[in-house]
Image (cartoon, rainbow, N blue to C red):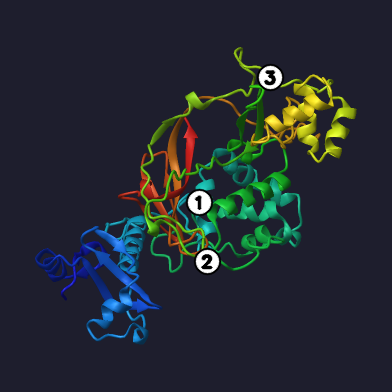
C-alpha cells in the first residue's frame, strides 16, 4: 500500500504519498474506496489534517476517473480510528489480557445477562456496597417477606429487590466448580420497569437514567424510617444575580447524582460534530482521583453579608401603570419591572425605562424574589427528604464503565472496591479480582464519605 502510515487506524502504509508530496508539492491524497456522493476520505499533507476537496471530480477526471461511478467500499481513516478506539475501550474495561482470578462466595455473586440487561446488573452490584441498602433489603428482608403472601411477592417491589440482595449475600449462587453461577433477575427487571416507556422493554438503556428510576421506585416503596436513597441525597444550590439590580437569590433542589457537564468553548474541527446532531459518546479518558475534597463547594444557600437579597414582595407595583404598558404592547414582566424601577413615577417614565433596557436578556423574565424561583418540596407542601451533612472528604469505592458508541447500546461493567482494599470486576455473571481497574473510563462514579 502506498498510503500514509497510521498505526492507530490500522492502516499500514509505506508513506509513498507523503514522499510524493515532498517531491512534487501536491498535498492532497484520496482513499478511492471511500468515494461516494461526490466526496471521500481526503487528506492534505500541507495542512496535516483531513479536508474537503470541492474539485474532487475534476481532479479524478485528470486521471481518467469518473466520480459518478464510485461507490463506497472501504472504511474511512476516521472510521478505522474509531473502530480501533472502541476495540481498545472494550479490552481495557474488561481487562482482557490480564490474568484475572475468579472469586466466589458471599458478596461475589454475579447477575446473569438476560439480554441487554447489563445496565441493571452493574447498577445493582454498585448499590450492593451501600450499607443502608444492605440493611433495608438484606438484614430486614425477613420482615419484608413476612408482610406479604408468597403469591403476592411476585408483584411486590420490596420483596423482589430483597430477594436479589439476599441471593447476592448468600453465596449459594457463587460456588467454584458449580455448573452455573449467577442470579437471573427476571422478575425484578419486569417489576422495576413496569409502566416505564423504556425500562419495560428488553432494549439496552442508560445506566444513569436507570439508577434515577430505581431511586424513585425505592422512595415510593420503602417501608420504615430508613431510606437507602438518603445515602445519595443532597441539595444542589443555585445562585442567581439580577443584572439590573444586583440583587441575589439562592434556590436549592434535591439531587441524588451530581452530573458534571463538559463546557464546549469552541468547535475547531469539523469532526467534532455530527451531521445528524445525534448525541454520541466521546472517546475521552478522564482521570478520576481516588480521593476528592468537596469542602470548598459547600454552601448553605443563604444570603452573604455583602449581598443584597431580593425583596420578599413587590408592594410598589402600580397595577394601573402595568396595565397601560401592556396595552402599549409590552410584556407583563417588563411592565412590572418598569413600575418598580421607576418607583411609579408615571407611564412616560416607565415606558422610557423599558425602551432603555430593550436589549437586556432578562427584560421579559419574571422578577425573581426570595420567595419565588424553582419550587422546592417545602413550597409544594411536601416534607423534605433526609439530606445528610458531613465531611467533604470522599473516597472512590465503585464505578460503572460503558463500552460502545452510545449509552443505549454496548455493554456496562461495574468495578467495586471492597473493605479488603482490592478492586473487583463484576461483568454480568463473571466476578474476579481486578488487576487494572480502568478508572479513567468510568461513566458513573460512586464516592463514599470518609
Q: Secondary structure at mark 2?
A: loop
Callout 2: few (<14), some (14-19), or many (20+) C-alpha neighbours within 10 Å? some
Quadrant housing residue 83? bottom left
Q: Is residue 325 above or below residue 61?
A: above
Nearest to the observer: residue 91 or residue 283:
283
Q: CA distance from mark 3 to mark 1?
A: 46 Å
Residue furthest left in the image: 23
Would residue 99 appear left or right of 322 to someone viewing this image?
left
Closer mark to the observer between disc 3 and disc 1: 3
Per the image, the residue denoted by label 1 is 125
Q: Is the Cβ of the residue at disc 2 closer than 8 Å to that at disc 3?
A: no
Q: Is residue 170 visible?
A: no
Nearest to the observer: residue 17 or residue 159:
17
Point 36% across, 62% down: residue: 86
In the rendering, at what x and y percent does residue 103 appear?
38, 54
Closer mark to the observer between disc 1 and disc 2: 2
Q: Is the Cβ of the residue at disc 1 closer than 8 Å to that at disc 2?
A: no
Callout 1: few (<14), some (14-19), or many (20+) C-alpha neighbours within 10 Å? many
Per the image, the residue denoted by label 2 is 116
Nearest to the observer: residue 252 or residue 239:
239
Q: CA distance from mark 1 to mark 2?
A: 16 Å
Closer mark to the observer between disc 2 and disc 3: 3
> Residue 299's mark?
none
Q: CA distance from mark 2 to mark 3?
A: 51 Å
Sequence-first disc among 3 and 1: 1
In the rendering, at what x and y percent does residue 17 appear?
16, 70
In the rendering, at what x and y percent does residue 303 appear?
64, 18
In the rendering, at what x and y percent does residue 62 appear?
23, 81
Per the image, the residue denoted by label 3 is 309
Callout 3: few (<14), some (14-19), or many (20+) C-alpha neighbours within 10 Å? some
Quadrant housing residue 227? top right
Q: Is residue 142 above or below residue 348?
A: below
Amino acid at each position: 500500500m502506498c498510503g500514509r502510515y497510521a498505526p492507530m487506524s490500522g492502516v499500514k502504509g509505506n508513506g509513498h504519498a507523503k514522499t510524493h508530496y515532498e517531491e512534487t508539492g501536491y498535498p492532497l491524497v484520496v482513499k478511492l474506496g471511500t468515494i461516494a456522493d461526490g466526496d471521500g476520505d481526503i487528506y492534505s499533507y500541507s495542512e496535516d489534517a483531513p479536508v474537503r476537496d470541492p474539485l474532487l471530480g475534476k481532479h479524478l477526471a485528470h486521471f481518467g476517473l469518473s466520480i459518478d461511478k464510485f461507490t463506497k467500499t472501504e472504511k474511512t481513516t476516521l472510521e478505522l480510528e474509531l473502530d480501533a478506539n472502541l476495540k481498545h475501550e472494550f479490552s481495557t474495561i474488561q481487562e482482557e489480557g490480564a490474568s484475572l482470578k475468579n472469586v466466589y462466595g458471599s458478596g461475589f455473586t454475579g447477575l446473569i445477562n438476560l439480554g441487554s440487561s447489563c445496565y441493571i446488573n452493574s447498577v445493582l452490584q454498585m448499590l450492593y456496597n451501600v450499607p443502608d441498602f444492605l440493611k433495608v433489603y438484606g438484614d430486614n428482608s425477613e420482615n419484608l417477606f413476612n408482610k406479604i403472601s408468597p403469591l403476592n411477592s411476585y408483584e411486590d417491589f420490596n420483596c423482589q429487590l430483597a430477594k436479589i440482595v439476599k441471593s447476592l449475600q448468600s453465596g449459594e449462587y457463587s460456588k467454584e466448580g458449580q455448573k452455573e453461577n449467577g442470579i437471573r433477575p427476571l422478575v425484578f427487571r419486569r417489576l422495576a420497569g413496569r409502566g416505564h416507556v423504556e425500562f419495560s422493554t428488553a432494549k439496552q438503556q442508560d445506566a444513569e437514567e436507570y439508577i434515577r428510576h430505581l431511586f424513585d421506585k425505592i422512595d415510593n416503596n420503602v417501608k420504615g424510617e430508613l431510606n437507602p436513597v438518603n445515602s445519595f441525597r443532597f441539595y444542589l444550590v443555585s445562585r442567581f444575580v439580577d443584572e439590573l439590580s444586583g440583587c441575589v437569590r439562592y434556590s436549592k433542589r434535591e439531587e441524588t447524582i451530581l452530573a458534571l457537564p463538559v463546557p464546549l468553548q469552541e468547535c475547531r474541527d469539523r469532526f467534532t460534530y455530527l451531521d445528524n446532531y445525534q448525541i454520541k459518546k466521546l472517546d475521552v479518558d478522564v482521570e478520576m482521583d481516588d480521593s476528592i475534597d468537596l469542602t470548598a463547594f459547600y454552601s448553605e444557600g443563604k444570603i452573604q453579608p455583602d449581598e443584597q437579597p431580593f425583596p420578599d414582595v413587590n408592594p410598589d407595583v402600580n397595577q394601573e401603570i402595568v396595565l397601560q404598558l401592556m396595552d402599549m404592547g409590552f410584556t407583563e414582566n417588563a411592565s412590572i419591572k418598569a413600575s418598580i424601577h421607576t418607583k411609579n413615577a408615571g407611564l412616560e417614565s416607565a415606558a422610557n425605562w423599558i425602551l432603555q433596557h430593550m436589549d437586556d436578556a432578562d427584560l421579559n423574565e419574571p422578577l425573581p424574589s426570595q420567595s419565588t424561583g424553582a419550587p422546592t418540596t417545602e413550597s409544594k407542601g411536601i416534607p423534605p427528604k433526609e439530606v445528610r451533612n458531613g465531611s467533604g472528604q470522599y473516597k472512590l469505592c465503585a464505578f460503572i464503565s460503558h463500552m460502545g458508541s452510545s449509552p443505549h447500546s454496548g455493554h456496562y461493567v461495574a468495578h467495586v472496591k471492597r473493605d479488603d482494599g482490592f478492586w473487583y470486576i463484576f461483568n454480568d455473571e463473571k466476578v474476579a479480582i481486578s488487576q487494572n481497574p480502568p478508572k479513567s473510563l468510568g461513566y458513573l462514579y460512586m464516592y463514599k464519605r470518609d
